[in-house]
Amino acid sequence: MAAALTLEGVGKRYGEFQAVKDLSFQVEKGTICGFLGPNGAGKTSTIRMILGLQGVTSGRIGILGADDGRKVRDRIGFLPEERGLYKKMTPVDAIAFFGSLKGLPIGEGRRRAREMLDAQGLGASKKKKMKELSKGMAQKVQLIASVVHRPEFVILDEPFSGLDPVNQQGLEAVIRGLAADGATVLFSTHVMQHAERLCDKVVLLARGQKAFEGTVTEARATSRRFLELEGAIDAAQAAALPGVTGVEIVSDIDGVRVLKAALGQGGKGQEALKAAFLGGLDVRRFELREPSLHDAFISLTGDNPDVDQSVKAEAAR
Amino acid sequence: MNRTFLIALREYAAYAKTVGFWLSLLAFPLFAVLGGAVPILIRTSEPIRAVAVVEEGPAAVGLAGAVSDALRREADRRAERAREAAEKAQAATGVAPAPNAAQGALSSLGGTRIRIVPTPAEITAAAPGEAQTAVVRRLLDEETPRDQRLDAVVFLTRDAEGRPGARVWTARATDDTVEDFVRDALRAANRRSVFEAAGIDGAVVEATESFRPKVTAFSPKSASGGEVSFRDRLPQVIGLAAGFLLWSLIITGASILLNSVMEEKSNKILEVLLSSASATEILAGKVLGVALLTLTVLAAWGSIGAAGMIGFLPQYAGDVGDVLLNGGMLAWFAAFMVGGYMMYAVLFAAIGAFCETPRDAQTLMGPIMMVLVIPLITMQMALRTPDAPAIQIMSMIPFFTPFVMMARLPSEPPMIELIGSIVGMFVFALFMVWVAGRAFRAGALSDVKLSWKAFGAAIRGGGT
């Protein structure tokens, strides 16, 4: 499959700070690619370089056959992380205006805007001003504004942030629809569940460097299955179970612990459980779990993606 | 459609569609008229003070007559001045003043708002001292019926050397109109009596005092090559007014731009725009959009001004039009406006790209606004001494050129200076566009708080 986006050894430096380092990956046409990483990992900097909003310090980027995002900006749709639209404009006017900047005639932009707003259940808000809309509604309008010109490549920076679960589900449907219509989608997120459900491929970024590139299944395979145990059990007791290669204490409330016992290659959960019961361990709840993308991320990067790296760096200082 | 033009149109519509814009547009001429009319209205609506004059003792006899004479002379003088002004206007414009023009001019000057009324008998009947003071207090009191009430009572006296003096009772402690008038009247009375004592006839003194020399100004640069007329001085007045107008328009436009960019920065719209258009297109679009707004403001103010001129001062309308069109002032005004607007608009837009609130902008805007006060002062100096070296130098500094050169224009500065300053201004404006473009690009995506250091770094780095 031909690549819609290619990054080769891309780096970005702000003064002394290296935001992105030697980043290479590619996104095939018509696929959905999750660009994952904790806050501060370098996702937004990379996206800005892809769009040509910022220059690269090293390496090269190819997008839709061009060597600079600015040359093909009319064929790209972009939803930034921090969203905003003109507060005094109506959704139809705002969508048509941003469409017109991408070469869509104003009249056609208005027609599509009305159609897409209706499809998103915002028909009743068409004539309201942006400032009168709820945050969720405004985000939908901005998403429509970024794709109204039917781009070939859609870049969504943290599109799910700030949305309630219902709207998150709706947005997932929109992203699937874009891909079904032939668009290539690259979206960044630090919430792994969305990527798990949507992506053909994920690229994991940690501290400005690529930690993984592949399918979700391949990502999961990098992490081990584990047995989750709850009860008055010592970590050492759990570690001694057959097939267990490591134990993590998830919580400890008055001696009642939740433990994650990682199973090694070929380790069987049933045997570990049997040994626990036979050994008289106080097992009150157990669950054999396949690794999630979240687990894969932790095993690949050593970072919890839910923790803001900039906060961690600040704490370290 | 071109992106720059689309951004310009949106920018224009965003303001032009608001009621606030049109209200603020009309507010300036309205307040300008009010600003001129209010002092006149206050003076003409001021009540005429009813003043009783009492001569205290035989030594003061005759002083009341001197005060009445002074009041009459003051009224005559004002009437004479109003007549002269009307005649001058007629000579300058060839339009005959309305029959009541002099009277209208007199009333607009306000005149001395004093009327001497017969002294109530109860004052003169009362024994001097506390009894008389009690009567005066009652007559000045607000509770006293209007037809009996007085605004002031003046007791005229002479001291041991025979010099006139007065005690002035007024209804309001803050009102010194009567006090000032009596002081002037007594000074004149004293002067006359001193001269008369020295053997100079009172009529001679009066004639001397009322003499007003006729001074006529001539200049080889006047239209006639000789006598200077009102028409000759009109370009200077228009030049100064145009300088102020230019300053006001440019700063208004640049400030609109600053706020607009700041709003887009704080609403995170700039980043979306940057993914759809280049920084240059966005900056150019916004500058053009606000330029259209500024032209709208200028057209509206110009129309209101022209209509007001034709409606209320038809005798001057032709001359003003002649100075603007045939004198070439309008063409220079347009050139200075384009250059000046370019310089300040891009600078303010670049600052706005770094700021999310007016408070953020204060770091840079404070010093810039202080610098912008300089041409306001210089323009007034340029009216009297347009060729002073300091004014010449100021007019060559690109930041000040549009305003100061506009004010110098009527004095016909050397063409080399005029061309030099305008070339310098446009070269500098283009440099500002380049510098501000780099700063704008960097500021639009930056989270750095605005400072001179950050601004400088942005210009050097250009946002890459």
Image (cartoon, coloured by chain):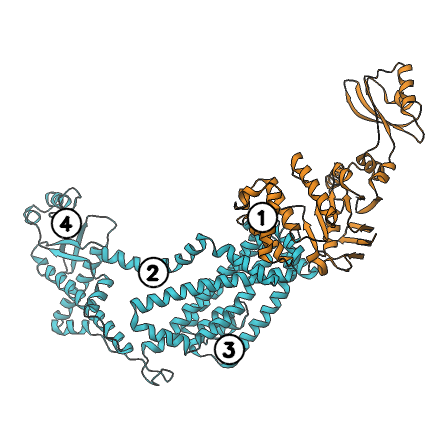
Chain colours: A orange, B cyan
Q: Report the Cα–Cα distance between label 4 and label 3.
A: 63 Å
> Where in the figure is residue A157, as x and y percent of width and height?
70, 46
- Name which of mark 4 and mark 2 comes first in the sequence: 2
Residue on which the image places disc 4 = B150
Measured Cα–Cα span from mark 4 to mark 1: 77 Å
Chain for numbered disc 1: A
**Disc 2 vs disc 3: Cβ atoms closer than 8 Å?**
no
Q: Which quadrant holds residue A191?
A: top right
Q: Nearer the viewer, mark 4 or mark 1?
A: 1
The amino acid sitting under disc 4 is Leu
- Which quadrant does the C terminus of chain B fall into? bottom right
Q: Residue at x 42, y 77 (%)?
A: B411
Q: Would you name the residue on which mark 1 appears?
A: A114
How far apart are the two marked residues, 4 and 2, measured between alpha carbons? 35 Å
Secondary structure at badge 1 equals helix
Quick check: marks 1 and 3 in contact, CB under 8 Å? no
Label 4: chain? B
Query: Horizontal and vertical percent for residue B323?
Result: 39, 76
Q: Is residue A57 visible?
A: no
Q: Are marks 4 and 1 in contact (CB under 8 Å)?
A: no
